Image: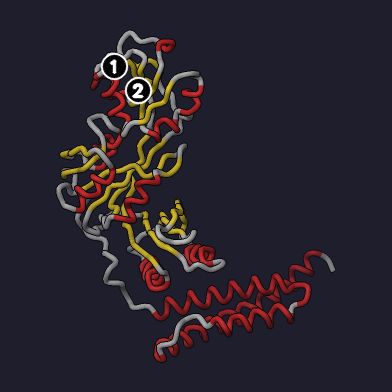
Amino acid sequence: MGLDELRRQIDEVDGALLPLFLRRMDLIREIAREKARLGLPIQDRTRERRLLAAVTEKSGENGEYARLLYNSILEFSRSCQRLEMLPDRDPDLPEEGDQMFPRAATVACQGVEGAYSQSAADRAVPFAEITYFGTWEEVFRAVEDERCRFGVLPIENSSHGSVLPVYDLIRRHRVYIVRSVRLHVSHDLLVLPGTRLEDLTAVTSHEQAIGQCSRFLSSLPGVEIRLCRNTAEAAMTVAAGKDRGLAAISQESCASLYGLQILRRAVQNTDNNHTRFIVIEKQPRIYPGASRVSLMFSTPHQPGALASILNRFSSMGVNLTKLESRPLEGSDFNYIFYADLEASTRDAGIRKLLTSLKADLPLFAFLGAYQEV
């Protein structure tokens, strides 16, 4: 047989398969309603194991492929049953409001005047009244205690990865992400006026900035690296001292702010250097235009558990833009996952998916739905 004839026969097989699959899904919905009436769980592991064993045995050399196929069918079946058995809405999942994101509010930032967090705060809240704190945890506490309405924190950098301590703080504090800001970051080498490159003995900055400028710093043999809490504080430290051997990796605005000289411009590893900042609020508000959803969850400690969750996103056509794992404290190699989705909670299907995840997973938290600016 030629290729065209083989393809014609495959089309015939597909035509026969589809009605059977659709009939199976209709039966699954009926089973879901009956399980809900009887108070039975969705998954029957014993029945599934028997089915997979029988399929594998009957399929001969195609046993592996048949098992994969039926694994997927069973996953579709469980997903369909979950959605069928869910309540119409989850009272804990907030609705999108009609109140626009405020242009003026109190905002908590880590650092001092001139920090990148300040630039992100100014973009998110143009008329912000900013209060500076020494640590990221203090920013979370200021929002929890309602001393400030919003907090602004870095969450990831395009060249140096995630800001992991902030992820850990998200887990420990009950706040919500209500906006994110994408900020282009260009680092300059700032020194006391008159300092030359050959005079340098040390460079100070935040750990993230040091990592983002690693190539330039490696060209300065013998120069000590000193970490500090943020890039603006690094500039302030250089300005406050008399040590011409000390330089700061900071932003251009800090040069004029603290009376420093720019010795080298744009010393980051790449010009495509962006940092995402999150804006947190105590109340779980969803402002108009929200198109990104952030979640935190753990999975059952069994093979394929994470793949099963990802398949549920995929089956809904949801794009994951971020998946980050962190060790779950007090457990033996169990992990907690953070996910960012391109999705809107205005979509009834998305709301039902989130409700199903909350019902099925050992740990699940809706972190927020928001717009990125």
Say which quadrant the N terminus sits in. Answer: bottom right
Q: Which of the marked residues, 2 or 1, is nearer the chain's N terminus?
A: 2
Q: Position of residue 183 (x, y in %)?
A: 35, 37
Q: Position of residue 12 (x, y in %)?
A: 70, 76
Q: Position of residue 50 (x, y in %)?
A: 63, 84
Q: Is residue 122 visible?
A: yes
Q: Amino acid at mark 1?
A: Leu
Residue at the spot of label 2: 248
Residue 167, compared with residue 223, is above or below; it is: below
Q: Position of residue 221 (x, y in %)?
A: 50, 18
Q: Residue furthest top?
A: 194
Q: Quadrant of residue 236?
A: top left
The mark closer to the camera, 2 or 1, is 2
Residue 35, compared with residue 79, is above or below; it is: below
Residue 260 tag number: 1
Q: Quadrant of residue 110?
A: top left
Cβ–Cβ below 8 Å for labels 2 and 1? yes
Residue 85, compared with residue 228, is above or below; it is: below
How far is disc 2 from disc 1 in space, using C-alphas?
A: 10 Å
